[in-house]
Amino acid sequence: MNTPLVSVIVTSFNHAKFIGSALDSIYAQTWKNIEVIVVDDASTDGSQKIIKKYQIEHGLKFIERKDNYYTDKIKQGEKPIIQAMNCASGKYIAVVDSDDLILPEKIERQVGLLEANPDCTLCYGGIEVLTSDGKLAPYPNFFINGDAFSRLLVNGNCGLYIGSLIRRSSYVELERSHPDLVQEDWDMFLRLAKIGPFVCDPRTVAYYRRHDNNTWYRQDKNTLMYRNRMMILESWCDEPEWPDAMALRWKHYANHEKPTHESINELLLERPNDSLLHYLLFCIFLENNEIALMKKHLLLSISYCDERLSVLPILYGIASQVLNTPIELEILIQDMESRIKEFQTQPCYQSALEKLKGY
């Protein structure tokens, strides 16, 4: 029987409370031909001592970083996870965060699927959430067999590293992600989907732990997630699906996950030309009846909005109701006519232009 080697990457940072359980779940796999590579990103809670104990018992490879990658303003070298993945020698790569768990048959099932589907770049299975009180809760999995790129870009990621198995020969073909990207599962999945199909098995293979020391409970979670999502989307802005992906993000942030005023201001320091952030500020100032600031950020949102986005004519329509002097409206009409001549045959743009000219 063919038993290819699987490299299991464990990313560690300040999870001394959980890393033993994570490693135990790896060594309890029914698939025994594994190499375990642990990379610790300068933990301060004694995680290294626990890892070294397992190193003595099981012979795992340990990459002990002295400086934390993500606290350095100027990033040096590879990200910890990439550093470890580059050391992998297996035919397949699995990734386990040091606070998560994989079920015993996870690797065996997924090796079987990838062996049976040699054109597939990635296999993934179901994930459940392990809450801080030890209970299991659903995770929003969705499953795609075959070409996954379009749906991944528009709808977001279908899973997490913890639920996947990656073909290493596909991984080595990929360009590296932005050095400041913190959670790169989605970006990695997109890059893999771009070069080959996925195969999935919806049965649960892993537990993703939520606790007070992971991203789910970070105080800056919303700011972090916004930054990451937009950084990833911008790297795919030339794809035909990109406008649909951005339309969904606009709806999401405008209607469901509105960042705080403080978060928006923080993000604008990094992203001063972000049309969506200016629109969110417009909404805040509209609610507070701060007219001058409301107009300012609406116009900035229009100015920075990509002409391919379906929200742009809507923004012009809002402006036709908010701007109240002939001079303001005339300037806006000139702007619209100069920017989007190629789009003016579309009904949505014609309607917006008619509203503006009807002042």
Image: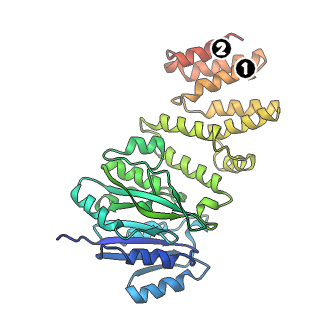
**Mark number for residue 129?**
none
Name the residue located 68 percent from the left edge and 10 percent from the top edge.
358
The first of marks 1 and 2 along the sequence is 1
Question: Which secondary structure, mark 1?
Answer: helix
Q: For mark 1, what is the residue?
A: 321
User: Furthest-bottom residue in view?
Assistant: 56
**Amino acid type of the residue tagged 2 in the rendering:** Lys
Residue 176 in view, yes or no = no
Label pair 1/2, CB-CB below 8 angstroms: yes
Depth check: 185 or 274 in front? 185
Q: Is residue 177 above or below residue 57?
A: above
**Amino acid type of the residue tagged 1 in the rendering:** Gln
Q: Is residue 41 above or below residue 245?
A: below
Name the residue located 59 percent from the left edge and 15 percent from the top edge.
351
Answer left or right for 286 relative to 306.
right
User: Residue 318: x and y, percent?
Assistant: 68, 24
User: Residue 144: x and y, percent?
Assistant: 36, 47
Name the residue located 28 percent from the left edge and 61 percent from the top edge.
169
Q: For mark 2, what is the residue?
A: 355
Answer left or right for 44 relative to 193.
right
User: Furthest-left residue in view?
Assistant: 1
Name the residue located 39 percent from the left edge and 51 percent from the top edge.
191
Residue 193 in view, yes or no = yes
Q: Residues within 10 Å of mark 2 (few under 14, many from 20)?
A: some
Answer left or right for 5 relative to 205.
left
User: Residue 280: x and y, percent?
Assistant: 69, 38
User: Furthest-front residue in view?
Assistant: 135
Quadrant including the N terminus: bottom left
